[in-house]
Amino acid sequence: DYPASYPHVVSVGAVDDKGKRAPWSNYNDQVELMGPGEQIESTYPGNKYFSLSGTSMATPYVAGVAALVWGYFPDCSNNQIRNVFASTASGTSDCDSKNGFGIVQAKAAFDMLDTYGCAAGGEKEVPLSSGAVGGCEQPLVNVSSLETSLDLIYMHASSN
């Protein structure tokens, strides 16, 4: 379960082609996000490709989504990106030890950051991973409070 169970690491589980947790996927109280992990085409020694399954397939998918989204919002901290992913994940109504917050959603995370900025992921901590606890205990931002703040900013700006 380690290094994925360290609080500063995003622990990733795997889902099948129907978006359900793969029965062999690891789980514990540190699982945060899920990614595709069943029958994923991958490179293989000898200049070949094979369909492989495992959290070793799901984890690079989630890391790739992180790189993609963070590339558009480089001023956000790692923890802010992490929290936005947790807030926008799909496939589960509540965070739990088998599915975490759900399946990572690149477009939903991008849209949230595009609308609310890095504040959607909480305060920018120093050092950058400060405040990370992992799993379902990872603190998330109440987006409705950001909407209220944005409304006040827009009202103030339009009255000037």
Image (cartoon, rainbow, N blue to C red):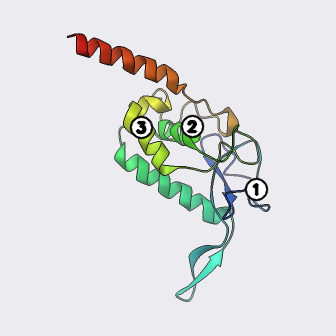
> How crowded is the residue under tag 1: few (<14 C-alpha within 10 Å), some, or many (20+)?
some
Of tags 1 and 3, which is closer to the observer?
A: 3
- Image coords of residue 30 (percent x, y): 71, 43
Residue at the disc numbered 1: 26
Frontmost residue, 71 versus 108 = 108
**Residue type, label 2:** Ser
**Residue type, label 3:** Leu
Frontmost residue, 6 versus 112 = 112
At a point 53% along the width and 49% down the height, the residue shown is 105
Q: Quadrant of the C terminus?
A: top left
Residue at the disc numbered 3: 113
Q: CA distance from mark 2 to mark 1?
A: 21 Å
Secondary-structure class at tag 1: loop
Q: CA distance from mark 3 to mark 2?
A: 11 Å
The answer to whether residue 76 of the structure is visible from this angle is no
Residue at the disc numbered 2: 87
With respect to residue 147, does 67 lie above or below?
A: below
